[in-house]
Image (cartoon, helix red, strand yellow):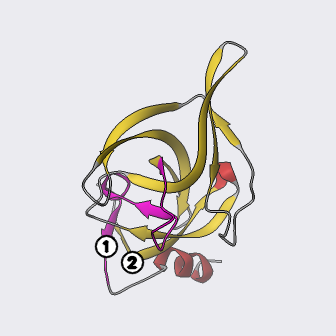
Amino acid sequence: MKQKRIIGRREKITLPKWGLNLISAKVDTGAYTSSIHCEYAEEKTIKGEKVLEFRLLPSTHIKYTGETFQTTNYTQKKVKNSFGQAEIRYKIITKVLMFGEEFEAEFTLSDRSKMRNAILIGRKTLKGRFLVDVDQVNLSHHFKKTTR
């Protein structure tokens, strides 16, 4: 079994497929699924194929690009929001880079405008990979600096 890395309550993660480097994410062991802020998501049919178009991060975020992304690899999922209400969200899969390792993770697209962090890392992403030390922050980013 692979050694689990210790991560903090907030971590800098990179989502290479979307060109988002070292974005602050809140680690939340109370949430099952990871989520990312999305103000626009729309299903379209392009050349006979269902495609999800979406834009990530709030327009006020320092790393917001306004770029519209597309994927055919998506589903819809019923989740409970932070207020305990059930809602249907789009779920997408992408690569995540932390501690110099790349792995796939699922993210639901949600309105996190009232939250401090645009990205939340849930248990499904953490399981089998990480242990959380709530006294720490940005251990993945510090790891990157010390291993160059």
Q: Which mark is residue 8?
A: 2
Relative placement, left or right, of 102 versus 107 is right
Along the viewing direction, whichever of 64 and 19 lies nearer the viewer: 64
Q: CA distance from mark 2 to mark 1?
A: 6 Å
Q: Is residue 133 magenta?
A: yes
Residue that appears at 46% across and 48% down: 107
Residue 22: percent from the left, percent from the top?
A: 61, 70
Quarter location, residue 147: bottom right
Residue drawn at 67 percent across, 36 percent down: 70
Percent of width and height locating residue 64: 70, 63
Q: Position of residue 129 (x, y in %)?
A: 35, 59
The residue at which mark 1 appears reads as: 132
Residue at 61%, 60% (x, y): give it.
57
Residue 12 sits in quarter:
bottom right
Q: Which residues are magenta?
A: 109-134
Residue 137 place in picture, x, y as percent: 44, 82
User: Height in image: 98 above or below 19?
Assistant: below
Q: Quadrant of the N terminus?
A: bottom left
Q: Is residue 68 magenta?
A: no
Q: Earlier in the sequence, mark 2 or mark 1?
A: 2
Q: Residues within 10 Å of mark 2 (few under 14, many from 20)?
A: some
Q: How packed is label 1: few (under 14 Cα within 10 Å), some, or many (20 or more)?
A: some
Q: Are marks 2 and 1 in contact (CB under 8 Å)?
A: yes
